[in-house]
Amino acid sequence: MGMQIGRNLSLQPGVVLDESHAWLIDIGNDVTLAPRVVVLAHDASTKRALGYTRIGRVSIGDRVFVGGNALILPGVRIGSDSIIGAGSVVTSDVAPGQVCVGNPARAVASTSDYLKKRQEQLAHGPRFCREYTVGGEVTSAMKQDMLGRLADRFGFVE
């Protein structure tokens, strides 16, 4: 329907991409849209009163991660290398390399600072291989191991 989509788009379950104005949506390379993300290119709140629906282009840059249940509204541009937190409502542009969270979403850190912090946690926190996921056929014993090792902190899985 005219939507522009780059390479390696990961669409998780329940993602909604505005079918009624799909050609107004542009998604870059290496983008992940987590479960139940909604991307809208139209806003029908004006239809009854004005006789017109408000529309706007939506552009998502390269290497963007959008967390679960986030909502991206019409007219928004999300710069490359950005992270949108789960449950965020993106009402305005996001500069490249920013971590944005909340309703409305606002920048809270640079992506590089955020990743440095997580890299420090990775160095000290428990790590688990891919077998510790549903796709890796995790066993009951592995689940108990993970629960025990995550008793009071975060960890990381491949």
Image (cartoon, rainbow, N blue to C red):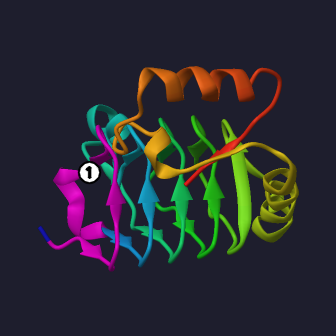
Rendered location of residue 103, percent (x, y): 66, 36
54 or 81: nearer the viewer: 81
Say what secondary structure mark 1 lies in: loop
Residue 53 x/y as whole percent: 29, 47
Q: Position of residue 88 (x, y in %)?
A: 60, 40
| Screen quadrant of the C terminus | bottom right
Magenta stretch encompasses residue 85: no
Point 81% across, 59% down: residue: 114
Q: Outermost residue, left direction?
A: 1
Determine whether, in the image, residue 118 is placed left or right of residue 134.
Answer: right
Pick the residue in front: 59 or 80: 80
Quarter of the figure with residue 51: top left
Q: Is residue 4 within the magenta segment?
A: yes
Which residue is at 85% across, 65% downward? 116
Name the one closer to the observer, 43 or 32: 32
As drawn, 14 above or below 118: above
Q: Is residue 71 above or below residue 100?
A: above
Tell me which segment is drawn in magenta.
2-24
Q: Which residue is mark 1?
A: 18
Neighbour tally class for label 1: few under 14, some 14-19, many 20 plus, Cα within 10 Å: some
Q: Position of residue 8 (x, y in %)?
A: 34, 73
| Amino acid type assigned to the residue bearing label 1 in the image | Asp
